[in-house]
Image (tube, helix red, strand yellow):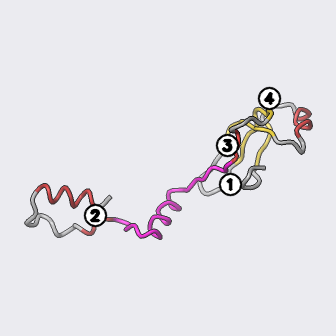
Amino acid sequence: MTQEGLVDAFLSENFIPQDITAWWGKEATVTGTMHHKPGKRFSIEIERIFEKEPGDEFFSKRPKHESLEEQINRQISEGKELNPLKSIVGTWPGEETDEEFDALLKSLD
């Protein structure tokens, strides 16, 4: 359980299941390997459990992951164009100087 909710987890092969019973109902820090597949839930392979220490709250946040498709959809909904280069296609070369053209390219970011 994190501050943001439940996290799927499982014990690694080297972890003795009886060792976890001492931690039921207590705050502890868990370390392990995160297994993530894009667009799906992630899980943590628990490799170690130890007493909570100051500063461990930072790691209680669920990592946020976006697939490439999710990232593109978010950026488009925020107003970013799908292909910003289309705004200059067919308009160059024009009368602009090299410096003006460089400034135009930088403005596309």
Q: Earlier in the sequence, mark 4 or mark 2?
A: 4
Q: Earlier in the sequence, mark 1 or mark 3?
A: 1
Q: Secondary structure at mark 4?
A: loop
At which x and y percent is residue 105?
A: 24, 58
Quadrant where the C terminus lies? bottom left
Q: CA distance from mark 4 to mark 3?
A: 23 Å
Residue 41 badge = 1
For the residue pair 76 and 50, the one nearer the viewer reads as 50
Distance of label 2 from label 1 (alpha carbons): 35 Å
The residue at which mark 4 appears reads as 14
**Residues at marks 4 and 2, CA–CA distance in whole angstroms:** 53 Å
Are the two marked residues, 1 and 3, in contact with CB atoms closer than 8 angstroms?
no
Instruction: Give the left or right position of residue 67, taking residue 76 as reference.
Output: right
Q: Which residue is mark 3?
A: 59
The type of residue carrying mark 2 is Leu
Specify which label sits upstream in the sequence, 4 or 1: 4
Of the two numbered discs 2 and 3 on the same chain, state the one appearing first in sequence.
3
- Disc 2 from disc 3: Cα separation: 40 Å
Residue at x 73% of width, y 52% of height: 3
Tell me if mark 3 has few (under 14), some (14-19) or many (20+) residues whose alpha carbon lies within 10 angstroms of its own.
few
Using the image, determine if residue 86 lies above or below residue 12. below
- Residue 21 position, x and y percent, is 92, 38
Question: How many residues crowd mark 4 within 10 Å: few (<14), some (14–19), many (20+)?
Answer: few
Label 3: element kind:
helix
Single out the mark in the foreground, 1 or 3: 3
State the separation of the CA atoms marked 1 and 3.
18 Å
Q: Which residues are magenta?
A: 61-83
Give the SS element for disc 2.
helix
N-terminal of the pair, mark 2 or mark 1, is 1
Quickly name the residue at label 2: 85
